[in-house]
Every structure is written in structure tokens, then in C-alpha cells.
């Protein structure tokens, strides 16, 4: 009996063909990532999803044959892992596929903010040539603060070192070795906020990281810092951020993620000239897309051929205890 694989979202054509050529699989593509057709849900053995497909208890109740879910993403807050554990469904993700792309986008925002790239760009498009009024910030010798020294935070730290910056980082869940390897100084969150010329957030969405940066923190941040967030929009209180911008506490801000996505057209953030915004495109490169698709396809084949798993969810990491599902049983 063939294993039925339902692909819910964007998936590379190469990996689709690769899966289709494997004996013992029937591969079906859904029309919309948001809605799983009931006839397929009843018969699917595996789902390949991205973040637009939400997995909840209700869906699992209606999937009698489902054994495996693979999300071709690094984030997994779209999956109720307590429910997948309860229903005995194996879940895997592809956490390394977009590390390079996300770190690169982070640095694109850092450089746009420090070298005033968009101010110059907009001026020229408006017929101006304001050389004298556009003054950048030299990064070399300054302090780069990282909150969350995981996969992406570590890559961002390496690039900061290449810019000859001092790196300070806050991550209570990482061992000292990682800080040493990256030549990053282990600091408290407060110290990172107080000393960084550039600060960049690379934390997962958890109860601890929700609203990690609010009015009370903006009161003591290093004045004139550049703030970058490519992790999750819930980390920063956006109305407090707007207040900090109005008080001139920040030199510039680069954001790829927002409290509400798509960012509402009425958001005040759109109007500040010193704020650079991108529409959650940290993982949007061809390379990250192909890597995520091929990794998902390989994981799926291994699971059904020899039962092997990797990058299973919930993750075996200490911070998982700080998620809404963290109180549940761990795998
Ligand atoms: P990761 O799990 O490798 O690293 C996260 C790090 O944060 C870990 O080292 C963990 O110990 C640390 N951490 C957890 N709780 C913390 C806390 N309260 N304070 C400080 N540190 C804490 O994850 P990653 O792959 O590096 O991804 C980082 C974030 O980037 C995630 O939120 C992910 O969803 C997001 N992301 C966004 C995009 C995008 O398109 N913008 C792309 C990829 C990943």
C-alpha cells in the first residue's frame, strides 16, 4: 500500500519530482496551505507544511492515518506540539536550511541602517543629491549585541567579528563554549541593552521572549543604538518602540517581523524615515527554499524506509520549557 504524502505549501519542483519517483509513495499537492481538503486529510500518512498551515488538535482528530508532519521551516509555533505528542504523530523541522539566508537578511538591515542606504536611494529617486546630509556610522570597533546565540545568532556574530566589532551576547541556555568559540562576551540582557551600538534579536517565540523589549527597557538602552529584529514580531512592543523613536532614543531600526503580519497599512512604523522594513523575507532565497524542500523530502523517505528521525519536535532544548506547550511531555 502506497504512503500518501500531502504537500500543503510551496515546495520545490525538483524535490516534488524526486519524491514522486520513489517507489511506494503517492504524492499530492494541496491547493491552499490554509485548508487541508478533508478527503486527503482522512487518507494522508504524512504532511509536508510551512508556516501558513496551522496544526491543531481538531485537524489531528480528523487524520486517522497520519504518522508524520514535516515543516519545511525552522520556526514551529504554527504547530500545537502538545497535540501532536498526544496523538503520537512524529514531527520534524528543517532548522538549518535558512540560517545563511536569515543571517544575511539581518546584515542587510544592519548595513541599510548604518550606511543610510535607503535614505540615499530615496533621495536620488526624488531627484536630490544630498551627499552632505547623509552621514553613516562606521561599525568597526563598535559593539554588536546579540540576544539568542543559536544557529542564526551565531552566524550573525561571526559576520560581526569580520566587521571587526566586539560581540556581546545574552543567551541563558547556551554553554560557555559557544561564546568562546564565537569570541562573544557572555553578558546579562541588561548589559547587552546598555552597551550595544547595534542589537539584534534571534530568539524563538516563547513565553519568556514575548514582549522582551518594552518601554522599561528603552529607558536604559544605549542611546543612538541600531535595533534589528528578524526573529519574531512578538519580541518587541511596537507601540513602545514608536515612543522610543519619537524620543530619539534610537539611531535606526531594521525589522523583518512584526506583532501583526502582514503589517497593517496604518502602522506608525511605516512613517519613520529611520525605520527600514521588510515583509518577513528572512528565509526567502532560492537556496533556503531548495534546501528546506530537499531536506524535508530526505527526512520523509528515511522515516518511511528505516524509521529514522532527526530534528524532531518538540526540540530537546532547555528553552522549550518556556513555551506554552513546554509543560507537556518531552520526546
Ligand atoms: P535557534 O533555536 O537555533 O536559536 C534560538 C536561541 O535563542 C537559542 O540559542 C536559545 O537558547 C536562545 N533563547 C531562547 N530563549 C531565550 C531567552 N529568553 N533569552 C535569550 N536567548 C534565548 O533558532 P534560530 O534558527 O537561530 O532562529 C532564531 C529565530 O529566528 C526564531 O524565532 C526563528 O523563528 C526566526 N527566524 C526568522 C526568519 C525570518 O524569515 N525572518 C527565518 C528563520 C528563522
Image: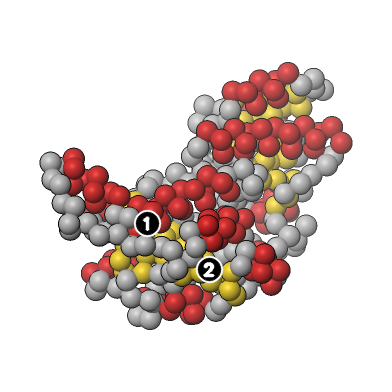
Q: Position of residue 118 (x, y in %)?
A: 28, 49
Q: Which residue is drawn at 24% across and 45% down?
A: 121
Looking at this view, is 253 or 322 the one in front? 253
Looking at this view, is 53 or 278 the one in front? 278
Q: Residue at x 12, y 41 (%)?
A: 127
Relative to 10, 305 lies left or right: right
Mark identifier at residue 254: 1
Answer with the quarter of the image where residue 181 lies: bottom right
Image quadrant holding the N terminus, namely: top right
Relative to 107, 78 lies left or right: right
Answer with the quarter of the image where residue 330 lies: bottom right
User: Is residue 203 something that shows in the picture?
Assistant: no
The Cα atoms of the two marked residues, 2 and 1, are separated by 19 Å
Mark identifier at residue 167: 2
Looking at this view, is 114 or 287 the one in front? 114
Looking at the image, residue 202 lies above or below residue 248: above
In terms of secondary structure, where does tag 2 sit? strand
Q: Position of residue 274 (x, y in %)?
A: 27, 59
Question: In front: mark 2 or mark 1?
Answer: 2
Q: Where is residue 269 in the image (x, y as percent from the top left)?
A: 28, 58
Q: Residue at x 43, y 69 (%)?
A: 142
Relative to 91, 31 lies left or right: left
Looking at the image, residue 22 lies above or below residue 185: above
User: Is residue 221 something that shows in the picture?
Assistant: yes
Amino acid at each position: 500500500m502506497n504512503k500518501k504524502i500531502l504537500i500543503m505549501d510551496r515546495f520545490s519542483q525538483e524535490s516534488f519530482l524526486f519524491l514522486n519517483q520513489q517507489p511506494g509513495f503517492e504524492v499530492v499537492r494541496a491547493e491552499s496551505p490554509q485548508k487541508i481538503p478533508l478527503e486527503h486529510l482522512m487518507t494522508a500518512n504524512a504532511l509536508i507544511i510551512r508556516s501558513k498551515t496551522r496544526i491543531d488538535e481538531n485537524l489531528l482528530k480528523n487524520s486517522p492515518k497520519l504518522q508524520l508532519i514535516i515543516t519545511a521551516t525552522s520556526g514551529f509555533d504554527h504547530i500545537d506540539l502538545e497535540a501532536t505528542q498526544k496523538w503520537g504523530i512524529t514531527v520534524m523541522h528543517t532548522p538549518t536550511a535558512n540560517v545563511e539566508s536569515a543571517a544575511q537578511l539581518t546584515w542587510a538591515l544592519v548595513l541599510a541602517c548604518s550606511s543610510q542606504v535607503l535614505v540615499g536611494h530615496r533621495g536620488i529617486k526624488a531627484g536630490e543629491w544630498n551627499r552632505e546630509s547623509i552621514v553613516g556610522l562606521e561599525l568597526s570597533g563598535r559593539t554588536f549585541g546579540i540576544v539568542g546565540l543559536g544557529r542564526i545568532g551565531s552566524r550573525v556574530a561571526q559576520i560581526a567579528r569580520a566587521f571587526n566589532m566586539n560581540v556581546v551576547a545574552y543567551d541563558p541556555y547556551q554553554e560557555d563554549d559557544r561564546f568562546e568559540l564565537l569570541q562573544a562576551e557572555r553578558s546579562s540582557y541588561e548589559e547587552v541593552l546598555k552597551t550595544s551600538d547595534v542589537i539584534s534579536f534571534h530568539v524563538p517565540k516563547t513565553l519568556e521572549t514575548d514582549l522582551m523589549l518594552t518601554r522599561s527597557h528603552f529607558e536604559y538602552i544605549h542611546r543612538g543604538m541600531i535595533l534589528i529584529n528578524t526573529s519574531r514580531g512578538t519580541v518587541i512592543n511596537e507601540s513602545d518602540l514608536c515612543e522610543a523613536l519619537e524620543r530619539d532614543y534610537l539611531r535606526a531600526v531594521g525589522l523583518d517581523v512584526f506583532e501583526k503580519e502582514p503589517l497593517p497599512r496604518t502602522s506608525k512604523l511605516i512613517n519613520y524615515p529611520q525605520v527600514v522594513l521588510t515583509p518577513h523575507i528572512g528565509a526567502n532565497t532560492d537556496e533556503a527554499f531548495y534546501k528546506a524542500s530537499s531536506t524535508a523530502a530526505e527526512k520523509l523517505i528515511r522515516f518511511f524506509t528505516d524509521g529514522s528521525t532527526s530534528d524532531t519536535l518538540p526540540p530537546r532544548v532547555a528553552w522549550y520549557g518556556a513555551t506554552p506547550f513546554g509543560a507537556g511531555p518531552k520526546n
